[in-house]
Image: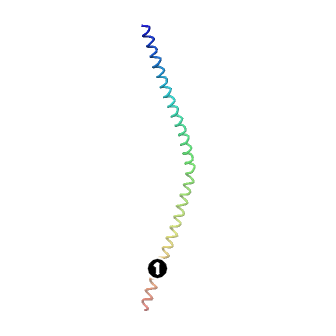
């Protein structure tokens, strides 16, 4: 009886200690994961803030680019119309010359 109780309490103590070590390791792992998550959250929060701050600048650049492209397209359209008009005039001139020959 007494010897069995002594052995049993020793086994329970070892089991309890092993369980405590395992739980302590789990707590340590969870704390490390928590630290990682906190660092990631701060990092992504800073990144989000930086991205939100740069949006107006990017938007302005895009608007300026669109405006420049629109102006360039108008210039090219005007140039194209002018060239078409010149071609029409030259074609008429050639026709007149051929008629006189």
Q: Identify the image quadrant of the N terminus.
A: top left
Q: Is residue 3 above or below residue 36?
A: above
x and y, in percent, of residue 73 in the image: 50, 67
Color encoding of the figure: rainbow
Badge 1: residue crowd in 10 Å (few <14, some 14–19, many ≥20): few
Q: Label 1 belongs to which residue? A: 87
Residue in the image at 45% along x and 16% along y:
12
Residue in the image at 51% along x and 30% along y:
28
Residue in the image at 50% along x and 28% along y:
27
x and y, in percent, of residue 13 in the image: 47, 17
Q: Is residue 19 above or below residue 78?
A: above
Name the element at disc 1.
helix
Quadrant for residue 95, please give it.
bottom left
Q: Is residue 32 above or below residue 92?
A: above
Q: Residue furthest bottom?
A: 101
Q: Which of 74 and 27 is in front in this view?
A: 27
x and y, in percent, of residue 56 in the image: 56, 52
Q: Residue furthest top?
A: 1
Q: Identify the image quadrant of the C terminus.
A: bottom left
x and y, in percent, of residue 31 in the image: 52, 31
Residue in the image at 52% along x and 33% along y:
32
């Amino acid at each position: 009886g007494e010897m069995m109780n002594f052995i049993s309490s020793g086994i329970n103590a070892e089991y309890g200690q092993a369980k405590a070590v395992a739980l302590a390791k789990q707590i340590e792992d969870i704390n490390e994961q928590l630290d990682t998550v906190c660092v990631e959250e701060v990092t992504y929060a800073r990144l989000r803030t930086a991205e939100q701050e740069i949006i107006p600048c990017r938007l302005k650049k895009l608007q300026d680019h669109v405006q420049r492209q629109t102006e360039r397209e108008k210039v090219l359209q005007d140039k194209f119309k002018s060239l078409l008009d010149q071609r029409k005039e030259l074609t008429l001139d050639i026709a007149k010359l051929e008629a006189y020959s």
